[in-house]
Amino acid sequence: IYNWGNSKDPADRRKAYAKRRERARLKNFGFEKLERLKGNIGYLDLRFFHDPRYGGDTAVASMQVLSSCDAIIIDLRKTPGGHSGMVRLLISYFLEEETLLRTMVFKSGEERQGWTLPYVPGSRMYEKGLYILTSDSTGSAAEAFSYFMKSNKRAVLVGETTRGAAH
């Protein structure tokens, strides 16, 4: 188990960051498979929503490939969750304008909003057909991604009921 940065020692924090990034890199930042299927359908098998500080470049490259497809399938059937920053980045490719995704209200009364990004590198794909595959293994950030895309009328969800851990 790694120390994910709770230490006050900057050297320990740098080491933890490096270990975490290397583990993510060895799994291609969750981007398991990307291909173009017959009929010019893009397929992305995403296994984890890694922190965009680590996997942002991989996400951008994947979105660039998908942007030339006529429709897109994102497979989240084996995706237990991940980082909300990657959720925001990927959703931003599929919505035309900045969109409020959620508002969290804490016991202290503090509110935090989550918005899509005003800019993404490459082409947005807000007019392409989008299908998201889910299963009972789809959880947390993957559920949030699916919910935001469905509630913004941008995707058709296909599959099983998800875990129910999107907070």
Image: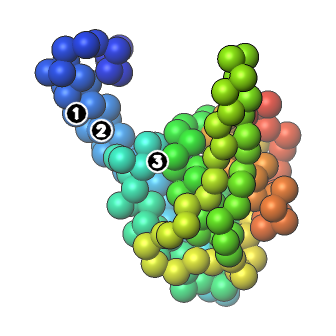
In this view, the mark in front (3 or 2): 2
Q: Position of residue 49 (x, y in %)?
A: 52, 45
Query: What quarter of the picture does the C terminus occupy?
Result: top right
Position of 44 relative to 37 (above/below): above
Query: Residues at badges 2 and 1 in contact (C-beta under 8 Å)?
Result: yes
Please state which of residues 91 and 25 is positioned toward the viewer in this rendering.
Answer: 91
Q: Amino acid at mark 2?
A: Arg
Position of 133 relative to 34 (above/below): above
Residue at the spot x=60%, y=37% of the render? 81
Element carrying mark 3? helix
The answer to whether any part of residue 121 appears in the image is yes
Question: What residue is shown with label 1?
Answer: 18
Please state which of residues 24 and 105 is positioned toward the viewer in this rendering.
Answer: 105
Question: What residue is shown with label 3?
Answer: 30
Position of 158 relative to 79 (above/below): below
Element carrying mark 2? helix
Question: What residue is shown with label 2?
Answer: 21
The CA span between labels 3 and 1 is 17 Å
In this view, the mark in front (3 or 1): 1
Residue at the spot x=73%, y=29% of the render? 105
The CA span between labels 2 and 1 is 5 Å
Q: How many numbered tags mark residues here?
A: 3
